[in-house]
Every structure is written in C-alpha cells, then in structure tokens.
Image (cartoon, rainbow, N blue to C red):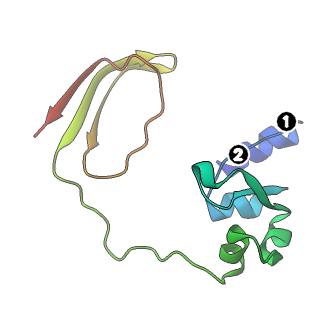
Amino acid sequence: MLSTLFDLRDIGNTLIIVEHDEQVIRSADHVVELGPGAGEHGGRIIAEGTPSEIQKNEKSITGKFLSGKNEIKVPEKRRSGNGKNLKITGASLHNLKNINVNIPLGKMIVITGGKRIGKININQ
C-alpha cells in the first residue's frame, strides 16, 4: 500500500490520509494530529509536522507512541469468532463482479464496495 501512496505522491498528487498505522505515519511527509479525543471531544490540532517533530512534541499522543514512551501491546490471544458466518452471494456493483464471500462473525471485519450486495444469509 505504501508504494502505491508514494507513486501517487510522486506524480504530483496531494494525499490526505486518515490513518493510525505506525508505518504509514512514519512514512508521511507531514502529520496533523487532531484531538484531544474523539467526536465532540476532538477537532483541535494537537500537533503537526514531520514524524520526527511529532515524536518530540510533549502534547502529542501520537508522538508518545512514535517515541516509545507509550505502547499498545498486541493481545496474546486473538478472538476466534463465534463460529457463525455471514454469506454474501452475487455482490455486483462497480468493480464487484458477482462475487461470493463468507465472513466470520464475532470478529472485526472491514468490507468496502458497492451499495447493492446481492443476497445475504447468516449461517449458524
């Protein structure tokens, strides 16, 4: 993904990316951190600059993670789901061409695509 973003930038595009992935943040030319919280508790610029400038900014929550002062530990155990699946059949719109997919339930799943998704069945 990063190489595609760099290619887009290098041919003259301006990219604005909402991202929390450390590698993407460290690769950015300029970072703008909004906060201090989400929703009505956010919306102010907390810090901005290069990733190295952000990590030196004491007000920056992102900077504390980039500098190693804070960390998010990877869970020792991942959720295995609940054994059920969401079955999507015949999804067609834009670049989706009549695809079928089984999606495990009880996990965080992200799907992007069109509005018309075809037929949905929940298998128990």
Q: Residue 101 is drawn in which quadrant?
A: top left
Q: Where is residue 122 drawn, in percent x and y?
A: 17, 33
In the displayed orientation, state which residue is furthest to the front: 40
Q: Is residue 28 visible?
A: no
Q: According to the image, label 1 marks what residue?
A: 13
Q: Where is residue 38 drawn, in percent x and y?
A: 59, 54
Q: CA distance from mark 1 to mark 2?
A: 12 Å
Q: Secondary structure at mark 2?
A: loop
Q: According to the image, label 2 marks what residue?
A: 17
| Three-letter amino acid code of the residue under disc 1 | Asn
| Three-letter amino acid code of the residue under disc 2 | Ile
In the displayed orientation, state which residue is furthest to the left: 124
Q: Where is residue 88 drawn, in percent x and y?
A: 28, 27
Q: Residue at x 36, y 20 (%)?
A: 117
Q: Nearer the viewer, residue 17 or 44?
A: 44
The 10 Å Cα crowd at callout 2, few under 14, some 14 to 19, many 20 or more, is few
Q: Nearer the viewer, residue 43 or 49?
A: 43
In the image, is residue 46 above or below residue 104?
below
Q: Residue at x 80, y 69 (%)?
A: 54
Q: Quadrant of the C terminus?
A: top left
Q: Residue at x 58, y 49 (%)?
A: 39
